[in-house]
Image: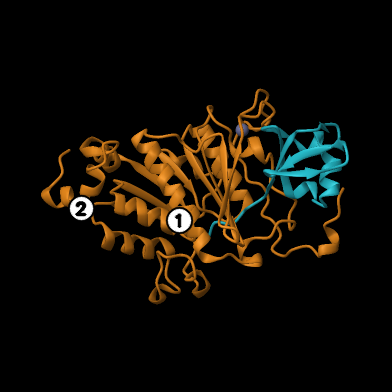
Chain colours: A cyan, B orange
């Protein structure tokens, strides 16, 4: 299926948000995930399906400031 | 309140703007902004807000200036190494604009003092460098109903967005809790290209001025991520999360608390497995 990840179209195997994270080799603890502008909390990553045409945004933690 | 001749000259480029004018400049002069952290983000925020004529700037930081700060913390100069950051900041602000009343607090921002510190202020700026402090500021602003301009930086990247409590998405709507200790590096461990602090901090200052003036479209329900390597911004549209542990429909956070400080070293790369 084709989905948009961080604004770029990408070809991914169908599955859950967790499957997409695994295909992208991203530790789920390091990001917040948004699916079509809706936050998907960590406890729902492996029960939320991603579908053709969906928009996924990965927001990595950024803790600096000083 | 009326401006002197000198002040009219000083703020003339603001007053010329129809969206600001004399009336807007008076709003700026009456405004009180609280900046948590007088470092990488706090420096450009405080300097630009001071130049803009913000009436009161509150600065809280318990640190002293370290030589490694000078690469980005432009409030502090070489002779300030070893001096209190808030004292150093107050002197620079006074030299830039003596109209500004600077309130300094050489203290840590904690769950027990946060509400008292932010109470007198109109807008709060996040310029801190730990996750526990970022979550604490978010929560305190929610409970005190104060608009907050969040900022974060790491390596070549930065993030900024504004939060109007009860109206727009808060930090916990996106990131419910801090990452597990040691997983995400701090700037101290991972480095930061100094200018990114300037880019993110000046956007924070811009948003603070817009909130004070009530003009334009605030950076709410939109997260702005910047990547200096690509010189590219990414805007992520968002909205309040009904499952937010703080501002959601069934919150479990009902009072201020501090998350534990993250460990100071990174885990070995092999430890970053998927779980
Ligand atoms: Zn929230």
Disc 2 + disc 1, Cβ < 8 Å: no
Vertical position of residue B144 compared to residue B83: above or below = above
User: Which numbered circle lies on residue B263?
Assistant: none
Taking B162 as reference, is A33 left or right?
Answer: right
- What residue is disc 2 on? B10
User: Which residue is at 16% across, 47% downward?
Assistant: B8
Taking depth in this image into account, of A43 and B143 the one nearest to the observer is A43
Q: Are marks 2 and 1 on the same chain?
A: yes
Horizontal and vertical percent position of residue A37: 66, 32
* Pointer 2 or 1: first along the chain: 2
Disc 2 crowd rating (10 Å Cα; few below 14, some 14-19, many 20+) is: some
| In front: label 2 or label 1 | 2
User: Which residue is at 45% across, 58% downward?
Assistant: B38
- What residue is disc 1 on? B42
Horizontal and vertical percent position of residue B255: 60, 34
Taking B225 as reference, is B200 left or right?
Answer: left
Horizontal and vertical percent position of residue B120: 38, 39
Taking B172 as reference, is B95 left or right?
Answer: left
Vertical position of residue B165 compared to residue B185: above or below = above
User: Which residue is at 49% across, 75% downward?
Assistant: B67
Label 1: chain? B
In which quadrant will I find the N terminus of chain B?
top left
> Across the whole image, how many numbered discs are drawn on residues?
2
Vertical position of residue B143 compared to residue B12: above or below = above
- At mark 2, the secondary structure is helix
């Amino acid at each position: 299926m084709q989905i948009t990840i961080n604004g770029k179209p990408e070809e991914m195997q169908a599955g859950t948000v967790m499957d997409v994270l695994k295909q992208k080799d991203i530790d789920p603890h390091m990001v917040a995930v948004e699916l079509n502008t809706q936050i998907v909390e960590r406890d729902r990553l492996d029960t939320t399906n991603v579908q053709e045409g969906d928009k996924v945004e990965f927001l990595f933690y950024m803790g600096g400031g000083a | 309140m009326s401006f002197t001749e000198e002040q009219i000259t000083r703020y003339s480029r603001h007053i010329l703007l129809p969206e600001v004018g004399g009336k807007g400049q008076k709003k700026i002069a009456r405004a009180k902004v609280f900046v948590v952290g007088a470092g990488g983000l706090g420096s450009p925020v405080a300097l630009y807000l001071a130049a803009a004529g913000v009436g009161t700037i509150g600065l809280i930081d318990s640190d002293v200036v370290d030589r490694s700060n000078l690469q980005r913390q432009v409030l502090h100069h070489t002779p300030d190494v070893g001096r209190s950051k808030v004292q150093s900041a107050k002197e620079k602000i006074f030299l830039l604009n003596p109209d500004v009343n600077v309130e300094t607090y050489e203290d840590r921002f904690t769950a027990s003092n946060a509400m008292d510190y932010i109470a007198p202020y109109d807008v709060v700026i996040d310029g801190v460098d730990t996750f526990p402090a970022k979550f604490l500021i978010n929560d305190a602003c929610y409970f005190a109903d104060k608009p907050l301009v969040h900022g974060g930086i790491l390596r070549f990247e930065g993030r900024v967005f504004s939060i109007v409590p009860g109206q727009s998405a808060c930090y916990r709507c996106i990131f419910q809790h801090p990452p597990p200790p040691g997983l995400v590096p701090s700037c101290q461990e991972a480095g930061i290209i100094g200018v990114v602090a300037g880019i993110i901090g000046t956007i924070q200052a811009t948003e603070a001025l817009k909130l004070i003036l009530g003009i334009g479209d605030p950076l709410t329900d939109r997260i702005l991520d910047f990547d200096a390597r690509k010189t590219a911004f990414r805007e992520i549209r968002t909205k309040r999360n009904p499952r937010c542990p703080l501002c959601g429909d069934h919150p479990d956070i009902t009072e201020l608390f501090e998350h534990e400080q993250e460990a100071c070293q990174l885990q070995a790369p092999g430890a970053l497995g998927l779980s």
